[in-house]
Amino acid sequence: MLLTGLFGFRAAGAAAEVMIPTIVLPDTSTQFVANPVVQPLPQVGTGTDPEAKLAAARQAGTLGALVDAQPTEGDLSPEMRCLAGAIYFEARGETLEGQLAVGRVVVNRSKSGRFPASYCGVVYQPSQFSFVRGRSMPAVRTGSQDWREAVAVARIADQNAWNSEAPEALFFHAARVSPSWRLTRLARVDNHIFYR
């Protein structure tokens, strides 16, 4: 852009006008008309978001890390109480893998079409679980570490969030007994033998 400027000079009582061409360049610097938007990046695995904790635990690669990442608060549905109760009474004190294998039996049965379609239906089916008396479960020490662990393992079994050492198992018994079952043996995990 070319502008012409008019400048006046006064010298010796005479008026003189001189036309001097002036070049004005456009301003090319970047100017913000609004405040810049800054979005913080999420931190992986460091928040209290349950989904982030679970994702971080899965990446950690151990069942123990996944158990530790399970939410410890909130009410359990009756179905999840039945599943956690079966794990608590049948596998309390065993390794996490042993507890998960027991939990997966309940889950697998509920989906098989050969057993009741709910966790409570499976657990309370007559003559299936030795801890059940009639249609009731013994009292659970819900404040204990064993119960918290059983609840965490129940959530993992329910979500199929970790592979069991006895996949597709529908039956199990204590290793100290020898029933004459004609079933396909899948695995021994801790003190239980699992079958399909």
Image (cartoon, rainbow, N blue to C red):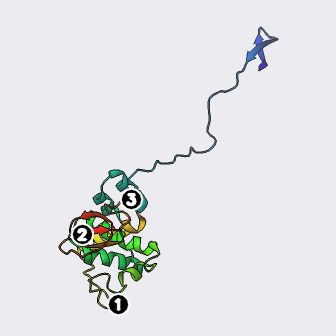
Residue of label 1:
135
In this rendering, would 105 be left or right of 31? left
Point out residue 40 in the picture as x, y percentages from the top left corner. 47, 48
| First in sequence: mark 1 vs mark 3 | 3
Seen at 39% across and 80% down, the residue is 122
**Residue farthest to the bottom, as pictured:** 134
33 to the left or right of 98? right
Q: Quadrant of the N terminus?
A: top right
Given the image, on which type of amino acid does mark 1 rest?
A: Arg
Please identify the quarter of the rendering in which residue 95 is found: bottom left
User: Circle 1 sits in a helix, a strand or a loop, which is it?
Assistant: loop
Task: Name which of mark 2 and mark 3 comes first in the sequence.
Answer: 3
Question: What amino acid type is highlighted by mark number 2?
Answer: His
Between 138 and 41, which is closer to the camera in this rendering? 138
Residue that sits furthest to the top in the current view: 12
Mark 2 or 1, nearer chain start: 1
Q: Which residue is mark 3?
A: 54
